[in-house]
Image (cartoon, rainbow, N blue to C red):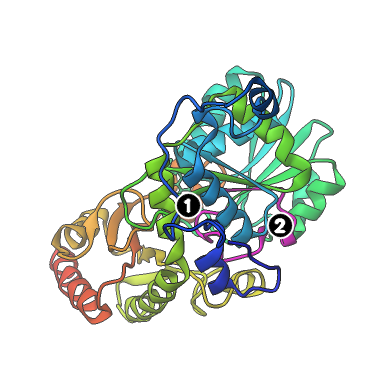
């Protein structure tokens, strides 16, 4: 099904990556399970070899449809699907970096990505330097002739710092480096990363793209200039996703804007309520006017499509033990990692020790909430009785 540049977002979400109208049959792409792809003639074999339709590892219909849909939504030239969000990060960094290169990573980066830099990249002779995520244009001072990649993740994991991506990208490009973004929180419709200077945009599709907590997947979206280089490494590393998983992720895409509208509305009401609780110091939810980072969110992100993930910072008088009581007491908020599904989640969190430069800002008890699609009055009632347990522990 063909889409046009002038189509609105809801139309792209509904129509991109669909089988062409002239092909009669199901609305959705077929799930083709294949290793071998058969060719009728040697001429057809030669024509296909080296391309993306020659062998099952390079994807079949449902994977290629998902790639096309994600490109249309985010405005990318190419998309590559990986086995997890983390493998999208590692594949991209291995594609763009060589021994002797210098990488700039925000101190607020997703922890397993940090671990990859500190272990495998270090072993390969690639130097990672962490920077304050709030650095903005001052990143210019850290750029070296060997800096190949400046990585951004906005907002940051657990601490939700909003980064000035256009300022960072301008400095990076002036020094000949490329900008890689972990765009998971934004989703492919929450911002326009390529218009803000990002060269490669990564998603843990596991989260909102899949949207139902049942598939692990990553997506690497590239500008035309970088697609070839990233694709080469991706292909050499043998990355592949299952056709069934790609089908489920594409099914998730169809309701992305509808789900985010409810996540955003529920999250706003929960943030309002949390801000009224005397034990709460701050709510880290950039779409909310009272949150740190709101001005940058308002400048760079889409006003309608914020997600449901937020951080909760408690006052100094609240020890982690009391936060654990709250977490254990909630009924509708499951305790678990990941986020982006239809359901609410809660996780206790402390960040002081996991940061190299900015840990001193987080000497406090914290929690992370994912606000799902439940009726918000039920979520508020659940939090109310959770806070009663917290208060009883003070
Ligand atoms: C979850 C997450 C990842 C990793 O995704 P997986 O699919 O769990 O490997 C990467 N970046 C961010 C910001 C995430 O939240």
Crowding at dot 1, Cα within 10 Å, few <14 / some 14-19 / many 20+, comes out as some
| Ligand 1 positioned in quadrant | top left
Which comes before the other along the chain, label 1 or label 2? Answer: 1
If the image is split into quadrants, where does the C terminus sit? bottom left
* Residue 157 circle label: 1
On the image, the x and y values in percent for residue 62 come to 47, 46
On the image, the x and y values in percent for residue 303 come to 57, 77
Q: Residue furthest front?
A: 40
At mark 1, the secondary structure is loop
- Residue 364 lies left or right of residue 156; in this view the side is left
* Residue at the image point whose x is 79% and y is 47% from the top: 172
On the image, the x and y values in percent for residue 197 come to 75, 56
| Residue at mark 2: C-beta within 8 A of ligand 1 | no
Question: Do we see residue 351 in this rendering?
Answer: no
The residue lying toward the viewer, choosing from 316 and 94, is 94
Q: Quadrant of residue 229?
A: top right
Label 2 sits on residue: 194
* Residue at the image point whose x is 50% and y is 73% from the top: 291
| Residue at mark 1: C-beta within 8 A of ligand 1 | yes
Q: Calculate the distance from the C-alpha at mark 1 to the C-alpha at mark 2.
A: 21 Å
Q: In the rendered image of this protein, does residue 183 appear above or below residue 294?
A: above
If the image is split into quadrants, where does the N terminus sit? bottom right
Crowding at dot 2, Cα within 10 Å, few <14 / some 14-19 / many 20+, comes out as some
On the image, the x and y values in percent for residue 231 come to 66, 34
Q: In the rendered image of this protein, does residue 322 appear above or below residue 112?
A: below
- Magenta-drawn segment: 183-202
Q: In the rendered image of this protein, does residue 152 appear above or below residue 13?
A: above
Principal SS element in the magenta part?
Answer: loop
Foreground label between 1 and 2: 2
- Is 196 in the magenta? yes
Q: Residue furthest right?
A: 174
- Residue 2 lies left or right of residue 170; in this view the side is left
């Amino acid at each position: 099904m063909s889409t046009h540049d002038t189509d609105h977002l809801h139309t792209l979400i509904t129509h991109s990556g669909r089988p062409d109208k002239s092909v009669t049959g199901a609305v959705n792409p077929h799930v083709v399970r294949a290793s071998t792809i058969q060719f009728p003639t040697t001429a057809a074999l030669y024509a296909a070899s080296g391309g993306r339709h020659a062998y099952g590892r390079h994807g079949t219909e449902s994977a290629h449809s998902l790639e096309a849909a994600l490109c249309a939504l985010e405005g990318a030239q190419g998309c590559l699907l990986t086995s997890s969000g983390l493998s999208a990060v590692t594949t991209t960094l291995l594609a763009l970096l060589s021994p002797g290169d210098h990488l700039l990573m925000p101190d607020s980066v997703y922890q397993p990505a940090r671990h990859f830099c500190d272990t495998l990249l270090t072993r390969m002779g690639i130097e990672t330097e962490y920077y304050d995520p709030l650095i903005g244009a001052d990143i210019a001072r850290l750029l070296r002739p060997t800096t190949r990649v400046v990585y951004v993740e906005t907002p940051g994991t657990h601490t939700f710092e909003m980064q000035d991506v256009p300022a960072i990208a301008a400095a990076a490009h002036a020094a000949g480096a490329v900008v890689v973004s972990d765009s998971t929180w934004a989703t492919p419709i929450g911002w326009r990363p390529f218009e803000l200077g990002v060269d490669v945009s990564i998603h843990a599709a596991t989260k909102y793209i899949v949207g139902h907590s049942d598939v692990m997947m990553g997506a690497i979206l590239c500008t035309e200039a970088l697609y070839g280089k990233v694709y080469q490494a991706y292909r050499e590393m043998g990355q592949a996703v299952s056709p069934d998983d790609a089908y489920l992720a594409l099914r998730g895409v169809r309701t992305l804007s509808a789900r985010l509208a409810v996540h955003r509305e529920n999250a706003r009401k929960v943030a309002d309520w949390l801000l009224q609780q005397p034990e709460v110091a701050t709510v880290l939810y950039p779409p909310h006017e009272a949150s740190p980072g709101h001005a940058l969110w308002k400048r760079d992100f889409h006003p309608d499509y914020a997600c449901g993930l937020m951080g909760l910072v408690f006052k100094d008088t609240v020890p982690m033990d009391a936060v654990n009581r709250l977490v254990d007491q909630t009924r509708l908020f499951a305790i678990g990692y990941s986020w982006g599904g239809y359901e609410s989640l809660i996780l206790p969190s402390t960040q002081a020790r996991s940061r190299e430069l900015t840990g001193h800002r987080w000497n406090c008890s914290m929690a992370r909430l994912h606000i799902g699609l439940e009726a918000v009055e039920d979520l508020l009632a659940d939090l109310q009785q959770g806070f009663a347990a917290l208060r009883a522990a003070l």
